Amino acid sequence: MIIPPTVRLVRVEENNKWGTFGNWIIGSYVFGVTLEPADLENRVGMSSIPAQQYFCERYSSKEHPDTFQVMDVPGRTKVLIHSGNFIEHTEGCILLAEKWGKLKIDGIEKRGALNSGNTFKKFMQVMKNINMFSLTIVECY
């Protein structure tokens, strides 16, 4: 039997313009960083989810063929963990990345998450034999 790791999302900064930034910790190892929307009172597709404990289960769709879904978010469905660079990519989900930084898009500098695609692939490799895990979200700001 494979024991799923303990996963924590420790939110460290909230900024309504750029999003909510956190650390993704697997066991005692800081695996990467996260980007979510700001707290907009749990509005569907627009807000970070309430800080509490959840279970995450494997999920697959055409757009996200292999990922995890955060289960039992009050009033919400399909809150996923996936890759993306900016708050516009979250739609209320959790983006995983290597680090935070700035990118220029059409001449405009935006703050976001960097090396997200590779970091998400590494996460899925770490979780390759795991179908469910516990996620604890805490706020430290």
Image (spheres, grey):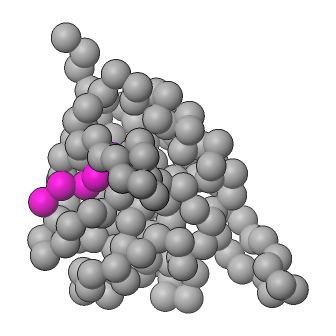
- The span picked out in magenta is 68-72
Residue extending farthest front: 62
> Residue at 46% across / 70% down in the picture?
90
Residue extending farthest right: 107
> Residue at 53% across / 76% down in the picture?
87
Q: Magenta includes 24? A: no
> Residue at 45% across / 58% down in the picture?
63
> Residue at 23% across / 43% down in the picture?
57
Determine if residue 9 is in view. Answer: no
Determine if residue 106 is in view. Answer: yes
Q: How many marks?
A: 0
Left or right relative to 54: residue 59: right
Residue extending farthest top: 1
Q: Dividing the picture into quarters, in which one does residue 129 lie? A: top left
Left or right relative to 136: residue 86: right
Vertical side of 118 occupied by 64: above or below: below
Left or right relative to 101: residue 48: left
Residue 1, image x, y percentages: 19, 11
Residue 120, image x, y percentages: 54, 44
Q: Magenta includes 69? A: yes
Vertical side of 34 occupied by 77: above or below: below
Residue 15, image x, y percentages: 51, 83
Vertical side of 94 occupied by 134: above or below: above
Residue in the foreground of this view, choosing between 78 and 16: 78
